[in-house]
Amino acid sequence: MIYQEVYTSVADTPMAQSEIQAILTTSRRNNTRDGLSGLLVAHEDRFMQVLEGPQDMVQACLARINTDPRHKRVRVLMQQSVPDRVFSEWRMGFARPEEMRSASRNAVFSLYDLTQGRNVALGNDDMIARQVRSFLASFGLLGLAGAPGRTAAGTAGRTSAFGRS
């Protein structure tokens, strides 16, 4: 079984694309070392991330994120064990909702709306859980519009709208 956590957060201050790229570079290096995979979604000052891998490594990564001064209002939306990774080929994929297929994009925006200013208690909000599941399920079909196939978004050395993995 693979452990998976999904969270949202808000940037403490607006982030330039170069800052996001630096985060991705560090994340990809650390995720390779720690056996993690996942996806970071960024829209304006909001982030959503899926992390998956060994439970102790996912939780250690989230602990680092929680102490990162660039983030505030980190909210874990889902913690679960699943039989397979959703993002198995992506050390850390990256997307903006406007690049995603409609099902993924709608789920991201719904999660942003549902968690805006709310005190989310893990597992207590069925609507949030449904939206997280909808988002993850949408990537079974690849959540990025125009991509030729799942491997195009994340195999080592390839570039796509998700950036370099």
Image (tube, grey):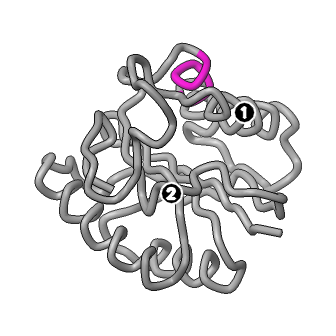
The answer to whether residue 132 is left or right of residue 110 is right
Q: How far apart, in angstroms, are the residues tagged by discs 2 and 1?
A: 25 Å
Q: Which mark is residue 137?
A: 1
Q: Which mark is residue 73?
A: 2
Percent of width and height locating residue 70: 30, 65
User: Does residue 148 sit above or below 38 in this rendering?
Assistant: above
Q: Residue at x 65, y 49 (%)?
A: 86
Q: Residue at x 19, y 50 (%)?
A: 15
**Dominant secondary structure of the residues highlighted in magenta in the image:** helix
Crowd class of label 2 (few under 14; some 14 to 19; many from 20; radius 10 Å): some
Q: Give the quadrant of residue 54.
A: bottom right
Instruction: Identify the element where label 1 is drawn.
Output: helix
Which residues fall within the magenta stretch? 103-108
Q: How many marks?
A: 2
Q: Nearer the viewer, residue 25 or 15?
A: 25
Q: Which mark is residue 27?
A: none
Look at the image and tell me in which quarter the N terminus lies.
Answer: bottom right
- Check disc 2 and give the amino acid type: Arg
User: Does residue 117 sit above or below 107 in this rendering?
Assistant: below
Q: Are marks 2 and 1 in contact (CB under 8 Å)?
A: no
User: Does residue 68 sit above or below 34 in this rendering?
Assistant: above
Q: Is residue 147 magenta?
A: no
User: In the orientation shown, which residue stands out farthest toward the top?
Assistant: 102
Instruction: Identify the element where label 2 is drawn.
Output: strand
Look at the image and tell me in which quarter the C terminus lies.
Answer: bottom left
The answer to whether residue 70 is left or right of residue 7 is left
Percent of width and height locating residue 4: 70, 62
- Check disc 1 and give the amino acid type: Ala
